[in-house]
Amino acid sequence: MASYTVKAVKFKAVDESGIDWTGSDEPLWVFTANAGGRVTTSRSREFGDVDSGETFNFDATGNKNTVWPVARDTKGAPGPIALAIQLWEMDQGNPDDVAKKTEKALNLAQWAPVIGDWVGKARGVIRDSLNNLIADDLMGSRTVLWSARTLERRLPRPGASFEERFRFSGKSGDLPFDVAGGPDYDLWVRVRRIS
């Protein structure tokens, strides 16, 4: 049976939040993975002093940038791949608390054991409750699904991979409201077939 991993590769601050000259962003990425009904959350480090136009790589040392099926995984898991990604501004607040609150809000496996259902419900949770936890600091959210069929087609053999870019901005993705200051961030992830 084929197994896969997803790694966060890099992000670009196309346009930081607010007016550029007033200060920099301190972004933090939170990744909530659903692999076969098991929901786990990992987070990046807080990136400090991020300005418009800058690109940052995620730390790949020791597979720290693996975000699906679980953090630092090297063996992978069978598809489908369901992943909810949030971009937070960390001017205030504790990064670990943000990750815990995100995982608690998105721990939908008990209500949606089918991965596709989980993705649909995750968007609703983000729309209805997650943004209420720390709405001022949530800059963007995307929930993505790569079906088993899509993975088989795009990654026909072990070792094959593809990169995908996602835009986090304004009302893009799962957010039902305009983010103050209209940040634009691009995130690249790499999906790899392990076996």
Image (cartoon, grey):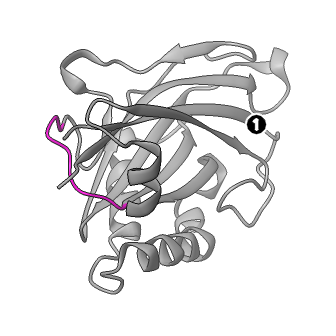
Looking at the rendering, in which quadrant would you find the N terminus? Answer: bottom left
Residue at 52%, 38% in the rendered image: 92
Q: Which residues are magenta?
A: 73-80
Q: Main secondary structure of the magenta part?
A: loop
Q: Is residue 14 left or right of residue 73?
A: right
Q: Nearer the viewer, residue 45 or 4?
A: 4
Residue at 26%, 27% in the rendered image: 64
Q: Secondary structure at mark 1?
A: loop
Q: Is residue 24 left or right of residue 95?
A: right
Residue denoted by label 1 = 183
Among the 4 quarters of the image, the one containing residue 52: top right
Q: Nearer the viewer, residue 194 or 175?
A: 194
**Horizontal and vertical percent position of residue 110:** 27, 83
Q: Nearer the viewer, residue 164 or 25?
A: 164
**Horizontal and vertical percent position of residue 181:** 82, 39
Q: Is residue 10 above or below residue 172?
A: above
**Horizontal and vertical percent position of residue 122:** 49, 71
Q: Is residue 26 left or right of residue 80?
A: right
Q: How many marks?
A: 1
Q: Is residue 102 above or below residue 112?
A: above
Callout 1: 10 Å neighbours few (<14), some, many (20+)? many
Q: Nearer the viewer, residue 113 or 105?
A: 113
Residue at 26%, 50% in the rendered image: 69
Looking at the rendering, in which quadrant would you find the C terminus? Answer: top left
Q: Is residue 44 left or right of residue 162?
A: left
Whether the magenta-drawn stretch holds residue 64 is answered as: no
Among the 4 quarters of the image, the one containing residue 190: top left
Whether the magenta-drawn stretch holds residue 79 is answered as: yes
